[in-house]
Image (cartoon, rainbow, N blue to C red):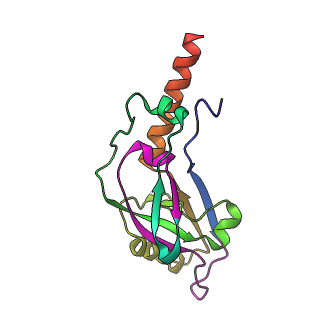
Amino acid sequence: FQKKFPLPVRMPKVVVLENLSEEEELDITLIDHAWNGTVMDAYSKITIGFLNRVWQKETDNKGVRRVLGEGNGDVQVELPDQPRALLLHAGRAGKQGAHRGDVVTHVDGCSVAQLNAGEVLKIIEAVVASGTDRVEITLNAERSVAEALKRRAMAIAEEMQDN
């Protein structure tokens, strides 16, 4: 079933960093990346290599093509070249499932979409400076992932209807 209707490579998740203090340095590092604004992005593995070079490998998986539709199935859901912040170093968040290359989409429930890494870090630092000892970071809750999951559900429903 997973082969026929694959999930996106980056699924949404939430990590909670607790027992934070202003004196303690945040143990996460973010890096800037601009994305192409397409649904295929959800199925494209993000790799961060030497000198923090970011690249994405598009899949040629038949199941992905089945989910996204005929042709190349690559539908625009955002304007191209929108900034986003990727995790370069996950630190304590890594113990909760955060990975290098995950996209930071929300901080304490507020969207940080279309912000660069520096702006997102300032927001996280401001939350910590406000006196709270915890911050909730949502990863990969992007429009591309949401659209991919919606299309996957529709493809599964269509398959079930045919059987």
- Which quadrant: the N terminus? top right
Front-lying residue, 21 or 38: 38
Percent position of residue 45, x then y: 53, 53
Query: Is residue 89 found left or right of 80 in the rendered image?
Result: right
Query: Is residue 118 found left or right of 102 in the rendered image?
Result: left
Q: Is residue 65 above or below residue 123?
A: above
What residue do we see at 46% from left, 70% from top?
A: 53
Please state the extent of the stretch shown in magenta in the rendering.
Answer: 18-47
In the image, farthest residue toward the right = 95
Front-lying residue, 128 or 79: 79
**Is residue 127 visible to the viewer in this orientation of the structure?**
no
Front-lying residue, 56 or 1: 56
Percent position of residue 66, x then y: 49, 29
What residue do we see at 32% from left, 48% from top?
A: 78
In the image, farthest residue toward the left = 79
What residue do we see at 48% from left, 65% from top?
A: 86
Percent position of residue 156, x then y: 56, 24
Q: Is residue 108 above or below residue 130?
A: above
Residue 28: say if magenta. yes
Query: Is residue 75 found left or right of 42 in the rendered image?
Result: left
Residue 83: say if magenta. no
Percent position of residue 84, x then y: 40, 62
In the image, farthest residue toward the top = 163
